[in-house]
Image (cartoon, rainbow, N blue to C red):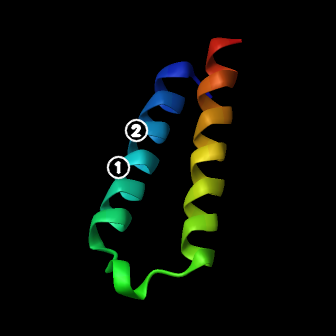
């Protein structure tokens, strides 16, 4: 996988993440939702770090 493809995937995943956050009703939010978002951010961070290595 090329760096350009990886960056495109990271941007797409981040965009999806932001859309999910904007669509979420805070009153319906559960701890599991926040845990899922944190896991996704951790995954994205690892991908970005791997691109710099």
Indicate left or right for 41 with 50 as reference. Answer: left
Give the residue drawn at x 66%, y 23%: 49
**In which quadrant is the N terminus drawn?**
top right
Question: Is disc 1 placed on a helix, strand or loop?
Answer: helix
Give the quadrant of residue 43. top right
In-front residue for pair 51/26: 26
> Considering the numbered disc 2 on the image, is that residue within a helix, a strand or a loop?
helix
Residue depicted at 62% across the width and 76% down the height: 32
Residue situated furthest top in the rendering: 53
Q: For mark 2, what is the residue?
A: 11
Residue at the spot of label 1: 15
**Which quadrant holds the C terminus?**
top right
Toward the bottom, the furthest residue is 28
Report the Cα–Cα distance between label 1 and label 2: 6 Å
Q: Residues within 10 Å of mark 2 (few under 14, many from 20)?
A: few
Direction from residue 3 to residue 22 in the image, left or right: left
């Amino acid at each position: 996988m090329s760096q350009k493809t990886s960056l495109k995937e990271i941007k797409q995943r981040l965009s999806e993440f932001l859309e999910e956050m904007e669509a979420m009703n805070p009153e319906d939010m559960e701890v599991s939702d926040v845990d899922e978002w944190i896991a996704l951010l951790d995954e994205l961070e690892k991908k970005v770090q791997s691109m710099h290595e």
